[in-house]
Image (cartoon, rainbow, N blue to C red):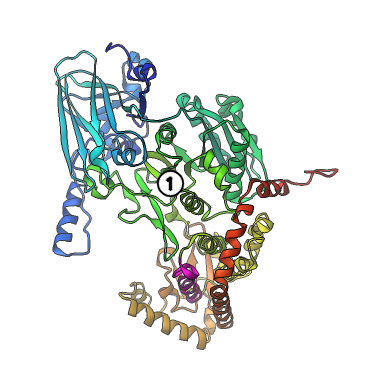
Amino acid sequence: MNDSTSISQQVRTGTGRRVLQRVIFPGDDLDVVPLYVETNLERGGAELANEQMTEALGITTTLAVTTDAPGASGGEVASIIRFGSALPAYLVEETGSRRTAMISEGRRVSFATYFNAFPASYWRRWTTINSVSLRIRIEGESTIILYRSTAKGHSHPVATIDIKSDLPQTIERVLPLEPFIDGGWYWFDIVAGPRGTTLIEADWSAVPQASRDGRISLGITTFNRPDFMVDQLRTLGDAQPVLDLIDAIYVVDQGTQRVSDHPDYADAAKKIGDRLHVIEQGNLGGSGGFARAMDEAVRAGESDYLLLLDDDIQLDPEGILRAVTFADCARKPTIVGGHMFSLYDRSVLHAFAESVAPYRWWWGNAPTTKPRHDFGRRNLRNTPWLHRRVDSDYNGWWMCLIPTRVIKEIGLSLPVFIKWDDAEYGLRARRAGYPTVSLPGMAAWHIPWQDKNDAVDWQAYYHLRNRLISALLHSPFPHGGSLLNESLERQLQNLLSMQYSTVELRLLAIQDVLSGPEHLHRDILTKTAQLRELRARFCDGQLAADLESFPPPRGRAPGLQKELASPVSGLDVLKRAGRATVRHLLRAPAKPSRKRPQVAVPYQDAHWWVLAKMDSALVSAADGTGAAWYQRDRAMFRKQVLRSLILHRRLRRRWARLSARYRAAAPQFTSPAAWRETFDASLPERPGGGR
């Protein structure tokens, strides 16, 4: 093997060999360094030991542990490892700045990281790959240590390679995938020699038993985020290996601030060229935008895959290459999803895999996983649960690759505007025999959910209605399992919290579900305006940005500090809810509470058991942009309690008939023909007639 030939060139000229995953570096963004390279191998080790000790002793609380060890923060990495622009010019020209790094003398760096460790168990389970080759091109005296882990998170070295020469050379090792049926990763560490070491490039490759050379289209739904879209187009335009795979990029623009009107649009789009198609239509929500991209990709008939992307994300385009390669090597057509990191805390992973609990019919983190994992505080090596392979029911459409063959067979998105469209599609695909894999090393950065609470604003309608519809379509349990009971409990919580607008929106959701599937396409374009207008009729739905818009609160409500403590048991919940319900039914609000709020309650303290003790409160919004004056209304409480009981009882009695009706109609309301009528109806009338 000629040492002057790059690994990438070898792969292109080899027979049947494919690069599965390239080792890459983060560029200039130091906040994400722990996702790519680890300089503190013990990051999180003390915390892990503390957890294991408390578990062994039966202690349920976990203490926060900090460390002053070198490498505990990403900021000092630059003194150990230099990326990109710090390299000699000839290296940058040969391999590109994201492939190469110089490691300071005597320092040890690890690639046991989210983007650069190889998730062996996922390739073992879902693809035709039986073994993987690690290729490393390196310059300088050094030691390379190869590691593997088990599904339990135990790790050990599998090989140690000593490099005695300072000349560039290529190291290759073939590693089996047989032991990874339940979980485990491969990775390598490098210990630099006395004169420093340059990692020229490295990758993981294989010869699949069967694969294809798939092509891809991208579908991006956008609504009034032209700045985000221009940045995303720049990212894609600068990623030539990704552009080489792309047939088309469909930007479905549903806003009033058009992407094409942005002053930097032309410059951002020029590298993409005629692959870029900006489609303007009325606001049909995420489901309408993504359905349009699905329809366009299938009608074009060129691509093997469609990658759905949110508009308000930042992505590493390397993930697109990995998604296409994984799908090409999959045993059967497979949906390949990317993970979501926080756009603000950039080393924080939102969710590793997501599932729908069958009996509760509620989405959430898959069992055995933990939300909001911070790789900046605790690395892959010291997080055992990350080593277990986790199977997903669905993947969010912030970044999700779907084979066009699957779209042709099972149809387009549900016409539900927002919420549950991605979850339902994953469940529908699974029923047809097509799995969803949330693939480590494929990710986007997105605004985190923790800064929102859309379950109480106008979107509460979609949360409940679409949850009910997806359960009617897919739940294996009578009445959707515990879904209706939980819905009724949530109604009571909102009522005790004086969130009467939320309760009214949820009642409307049940009414629309009861009316049958015909309302889905009929109302998708007009429903959101109706919901906003309905919410604005209630005090709790009238937000003001300036707190001076409200009378000053009288002070602290009686017993507020005591009530901030959450219920300690199920019996405590029942007692508090019972006492509060009697109070709201029988006791009239205190007259002074109509003139001034009793107290100002920060969003994070606005639990139902806190608000249930009050007659009025000034409550801030989850995103911190404003506040609303909640006021208790005994007549409204009584009216909404009665309607909630009646509608939930009616839904329970009609569940079986409704389920049969929605399931029978599903092929029609997810069909391209039905959606095309809705796309056309969303366009504004033109002067002289037509659209």
Closest to the observer, 406 or 529: 406
Write down the quadrant of residue 319 in the picture.
top left
Q: Position of residue 69 (x, y in %)?
A: 18, 41
Let me know if residue 494 is in the magenta part: yes
Magenta stretch prevailing secondary structure: helix
Q: Could you tell me which quadrant the N terminus lies in?
A: top left
Q: Position of residue 675 (x, y in %)?
A: 66, 48
Q: Residue furthest bottom?
A: 586
Callout 1 amino acid: Pro
Residue drawn at x 34%, y 72% is 566
Q: Which residue is mark 1?
A: 435
Closest to the observer, 227 or 639: 639
Q: Where are the magenta residues, as a range?
A: 477-496
| Residue 85 higher or lower than 405, as above or below | above
Residue 156 horizontal side relative to residue 455, left or right: left
Q: Residue furthest right?
A: 688
Closest to the observer, 263 or 418: 418
Residue drawn at x 41%, y 30% is 211
Residue drawn at x 59%, y 54% is 417
Q: Could you tell me which quadrant the C terminus lies in?
A: top right
Residue 269 horizontal side relative to residue 183, left or right: right
Report helix, strand or loop for mark 1. loop
Write down the quadrant of residue 3 in the picture.
top left
Residue 493 shows up from this direction: yes
Let me know if residue 594 is in the magenta part: no
| Residue 534 higher or lower than 87, as above or below | below
Q: Position of residue 14 (x, y in %)?
A: 36, 18
| Residue 590 higher or lower than 284, as above or below | below
Label 1: few (<14), some (14–19) or many (≥20) C-alpha neighbours in 10 Å:
many
Closest to the observer, 294 or 177: 177
